[in-house]
Image: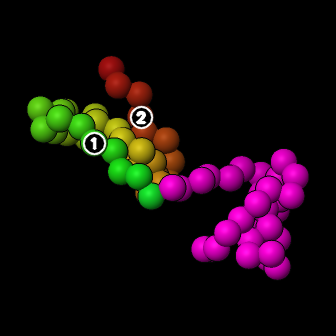
């Protein structure tokens, strides 16, 4: 959903003054991107940035 939103209460958002959405949790994505040094790329799939989290369907396995 897109539009100006405001919290009506702890679990309800009102979007564009007309649509209400009740949610257990709310993620506010402001459009920023993570930035890190090129040397971090050697970490491969052990490097976790905020952009990755939104594509997860389950939690990653713990590292040894």
Query: Residue 53, percent across and down?
Result: 45, 48
Q: CA distance from mark 2 to mark 1?
A: 24 Å
Residue position marked by numbered label 2 in the rendering: 61
Q: Is residue 52 magenta?
A: no
Q: Secondary structure at mark 2?
A: loop
Query: Residue 64, percent across and down?
Result: 33, 20
Way the structure is coloured: rainbow
Residue for point 45% across, 58% down: 31
Residue for point 24% across, 37% down: 36
Q: Is residue 44 left or right of residue 13?
A: left
Residue for point 71% across, 50% down: 25
Q: Is residue 59 left or right of residue 45?
A: right
Query: Residue 22, percent across and down?
Result: 82, 62
Query: Residue 38, percent across and down?
Result: 12, 38
Mark identifier at residue 35: 1
Magenta segment boundaries in residue numbering: 1-30
């Amino acid at each position: 959903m897109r539009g100006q939103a405001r919290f009506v209460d702890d679990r309800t958002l009102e979007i564009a003054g007309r649509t209400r959405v009740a949610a257990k949790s709310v993620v506010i994505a402001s459009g920023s991107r993570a930035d890190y040094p090129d040397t971090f790329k050697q970490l491969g799939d052990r490097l976790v940035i905020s952009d990755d989290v939104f594509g997860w369907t389950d939690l990653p396995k713990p590292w040894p």
